[in-house]
Image (cartoon, rainbow, N blue to C red):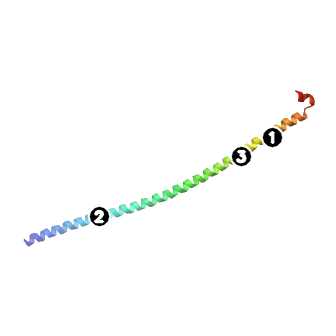
Amino acid sequence: DVAVQLTDLMRKDADLRVANKQTLLQLEDARAQLEQARIELEVAKDLQLQAKAAQLQAEEARDKAEASLNELQQSHQEQLEHIETLRSDLIGAVIDSAGPEEEEL
């Protein structure tokens, strides 16, 4: 009877050791998964910072392009006004240089 109890206790002890070993393996696996998740989170944070920097650079480039476009539009408008002034001056000069006979035409 004692031998049977001892055998049962030894079997239970062996079963508990196996279960403990499996639990330890699961724990190690969970730790590895946690570390992998931490690494992925750091990578994601780094990528997010890079994306934000790229966004800021793109916004800066857009702002510069808009400013350049505005300057070009202003310059174009000034050139058009200058051309119109020259055209008007040229017409005035032609009229002034024409004699009284040509003015009537």
**Viewer-side residue, 68 vs 78:** 78
> Which residue is depicted at the point 16% across and 67% down?
11
* Between marks 2 and 3 in the image, the one whose residue lies nearer the viewer: 3
Residue on which disc 2 sits? 25
Farthest residue toward the bottom?
A: 2
**Viewer-side residue, 38 vs 81:** 81
Relative image position of residue 77 (x, y in whole percent): 73, 43
Which amino acid type is shown beneath numbered disc 1? Thr
Q: Secondary structure at mark 1?
A: helix
Circles 2 and 3, Cβ within 8 Å, touching? The answer is no
Residue on which disc 3 sits? 74
Relative image position of residue 46 (x, y in whole percent): 49, 59
Q: Mark 3, residues whose alpha carbon is within 10 Å: few (<14), some, or many (≥20)?
A: few
Work out whether mark 2 precedes mark 1 in sequence or the reverse, and give the earlier one.
2
- Quarter of the picture holding the C terminus: top right
Q: Secondary structure at mark 2?
A: helix
Relative image position of residue 66 (x, y in whole percent): 64, 48
